[in-house]
């Protein structure tokens, strides 16, 4: 059961909508199921003599009195509106059950506490099988405004109790960090235009994807505009600095032909200008991947940073953990954009799903996650997908998503835990699509039997407690190929196995050989590193000589010319 509290200032306009045919003639049999006074509330859906204006005046009675007291100043946003909808698949409630729901919600939210004779006037209108609309005018009979602080949270809490008592589907409680859901009008507009998502949802995903990739605020707005998105910034009156912004989707106009604007914070809480600035710190030019010696570095750096993030989730610093989850949300977008192949769709779906898990009421320490955020931005500019290393990164994301779901669950973040679990399922499906053929190829290229026996001895010596499970794992043959590659790259297999085996415990791993395979794949090529370092030293020496050439000695004219030339 989902309540959605909002406020407005037009009592009659909302009544006209509630009792009208709907935007697509979807309203059937509109009528009042409960009210502050069933005898005193004219019902345009049941009484032929009742009008919208009569009902509006009865609801606004105390508002009108208060307006006269204030000398013609009507209280702002005095209309309280709360649609309440059952979950898909739930049974349809009777009018009497919906009336009880409405009375409990106005009591829980402070609109009309039970037994309070001076409470706000309200009605509950049903015009569909699966939901009602509760509306109230928020001026009490004594002229005061009701205490509606945290009314959305209180409505949710009451709905959780109602679900249990009515035998309905139990939904996840929120913490006011969820983005705004599209309105019915937005959904209807998207359907008319043949779109699968509303303009609000599309803008939100574009903003997240761009924020994940860019290095500063200026780039953020520039890239959004390059996608055809209209950008409108709000400047401070004194400083002229940007203090807010709004976005409009291409072709999304109102009836007057004007763009429909959505403020950053209205798209999602962490897309406000202040929250963005916490994450978009300028990076040095040399941080750009084109300055990296190895094209595989962005993938390797991100994999290492994700392994670190798992450690942070277990460390007990909730602010740092929340910062890493926000950075992981960015990383998922960039991993999806840098990935090729059919599993890319699953990765994109994982990034979208994880958006609800990337924030909670815990304030994130974004500085703690600088390494992961920087590595994720490297991926946005990476060229090429380095085979097995990309699978190793994907394998790491699967485990971090599962750890994120557990972390949120332990802290009572029900919606975030469910979102992380959904992201985990998408990542797991993407990993299976990508990894199965790669592991099969590694197994086909397994080394000779003598080399495999030597690697078996290395496993038993380096990881004696896990050796039997590793050797019995179907991925063991593929691991022997990876160990052979690592040995060629300059690693000592036994030392390498001990090192990667100590990164995290292997006891809970269902496929320990598979875990080791991807951990080893993510290790750098030592021989290539040494060659690059040697080349860099030679380059610096050459540049130094060019910039500061040695003084040319005066030739000894007494020697033969051939000797003077060093022959």
Image: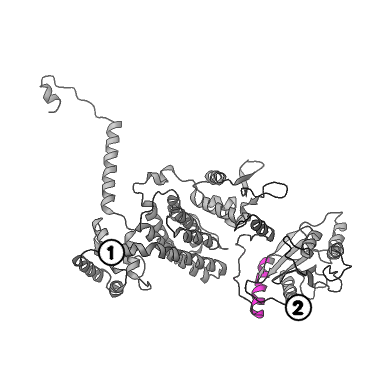
Res 497 seen here? no
| Residue lying farthest to the top in this orientation | 557
In the image: residue 19, left or right of residue 260 = right
Few, some or many residues within 10 Å of mark 1 (<14, 14–19, 20+): few
The image position of residue 239, as x and y in percent, is 63, 41
The image position of residue 241, as x and y in percent, is 61, 42
Q: Are marks 1 and 2 in contact (CB under 8 Å)?
A: no
In the image: residue 346, left or right of residue 168 = left
Few, some or many residues within 10 Å of mark 2 (<14, 14–19, 20+): few
The image position of residue 56, as x and y in percent, is 84, 63
Q: Nearer the viewer, residue 454 or 437?
A: 437
Q: Which residue is mark 1?
A: 444
Q: Nearer the viewer, residue 250 or 1?
A: 250
Q: Quadrant of residue 461?
A: bottom left
Residue at horizontal 14 percent and vertical 28 percent from the top: 566
Q: Which residue is mark 2?
A: 96
Quarter of the figure that contains the C terminus: top left
Disc tally is 2
Q: Which residues are magenta?
A: 152-177
Residue 493 drawn above or below residue 93: above
Q: Secondary structure at mark 1?
A: helix
The image position of residue 214, as x and y in percent, is 50, 48
Q: Is residue 79 magenta?
A: no
Quarter of the figure that contains the N terminus: bottom right
| Residue lying farthest to the right in this orientation | 49
Q: Secondary structure at mark 2?
A: helix
The Cα atoms of the two marked residues, 1 and 2, are separated by 68 Å
Residue 145 drawn above or below residue 103: above
* Res 383 label: none
In the image: residue 384, left or right of residue 534 = right
Mark toward the start of the polypeptide (1 vs 2)? 2
């Amino acid at each position: 059961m989902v309540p959605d509290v909002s406020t407005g200032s037009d009592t009659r306009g909302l009544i006209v909508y509630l009792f009208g045919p709907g935007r697509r003639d979807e309203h059937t049999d509109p009528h009042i199921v409960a009210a502050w006074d069933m005898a005193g509330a004219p019902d345009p859906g049941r009484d032929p003599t009742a009008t919208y204006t009569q009902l509006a005046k009865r609801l606004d009675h105390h508002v009108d009195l208060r307006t006269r007291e204030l000398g013609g100043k009507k209280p702002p946003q005095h209309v309280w509106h709360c649609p309440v909808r059952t979950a898909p698949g739930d049974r349809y409630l009777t009018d009497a059950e919906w009336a009880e729901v409405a009375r409990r919600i106005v009591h829980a939210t402070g609109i009309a506490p039970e037994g309070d004779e001076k409470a706000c006037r309200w009605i509950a209108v049903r015009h569909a099988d699966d939901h009602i609309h509760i509306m109230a005018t928020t001026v009490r009979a004594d002229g005061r405004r009701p205490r509606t602080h945290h009314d959305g949270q209180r409505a949710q809490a009451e709905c959780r109790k109602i679900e249990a008592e009515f035998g309905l589907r139990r939904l996840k409680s929120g913490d006011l960090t969820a983005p705004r859901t599209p309105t019915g009008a937005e959904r209807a507009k998207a359907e008319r235009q043949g779109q699968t998502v509303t303009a609000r949802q599309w803008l939100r995903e574009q903003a997240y994807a761009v924020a994940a990739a860019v290095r500063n605020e200026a780039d953020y707005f520039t890239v959004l505009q390059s996608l055809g998105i209209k950008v409108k910034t709000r400047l401070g009156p004194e400083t002229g600095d940007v203090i807010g912004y709004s976005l409009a989707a291409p072709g999304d106009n109102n009836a007057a032909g004007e763009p429909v604007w959505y403020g950053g914070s209205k798209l999602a809480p962490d897309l406000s200008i202040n929250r963005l600035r916490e994450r978009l710190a300028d990076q040095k030019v040399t941080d750009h991947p084109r300055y990296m010696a190895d094209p595989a570095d962005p993938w390797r750096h991100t994999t290492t940073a994700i392994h670190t993030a798992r450690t942070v989730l277990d460390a007990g610093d909730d602010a740092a953990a929340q910062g890493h989850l926000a950075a992981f949300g960015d990383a998922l977008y960039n991993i999806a954009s840098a990935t090729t192949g059919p599993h890319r769709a699953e990765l994109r779906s994982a990034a979208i799903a994880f958006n609800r898990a990337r924030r909670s009421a815990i304030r994130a320490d974004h500085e703690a996650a600088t390494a992961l955020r920087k590595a994720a931005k490297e991926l946005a500019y990476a060229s090429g997908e380095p085979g097995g290393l990309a699978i190793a990164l994907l394998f790491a994301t699967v485990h971090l998503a599962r750890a994120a779901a557990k972390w949120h669950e332990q802290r009572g973040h029900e919606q975030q835990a469910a979102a992380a679990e959904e992201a985990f399922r998408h990542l797991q499906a993407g990993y299976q699509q990508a990894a199965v053929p790669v592991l099969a190829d590694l197994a086909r290229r397994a080394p000779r039997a003598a080399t495999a026996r030597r690697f078996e001895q290395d496993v038993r010596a380096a990881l004696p407690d896990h050796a039997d499970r590793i050797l019995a794992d179907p991925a063991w043959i593929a691991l022997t190929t990876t160990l052979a590659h690592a040995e060629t790259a300059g690693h000592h297999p036994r030392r390498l196995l001990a090192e990667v085996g100590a990164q995290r415990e292997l006891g809970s791993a269902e496929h320990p050989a598979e875990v080791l395979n991807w951990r080893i794949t993510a290790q750098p090529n030592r021989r290539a590193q040494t060659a690059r370092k040697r080349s860099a030293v030679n380059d610096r020496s050459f540049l130094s000589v060019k910039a500061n050439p040695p003084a040319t000695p005066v030739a000894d004219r007494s020697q033969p010319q051939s000797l003077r030339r060093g022959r």
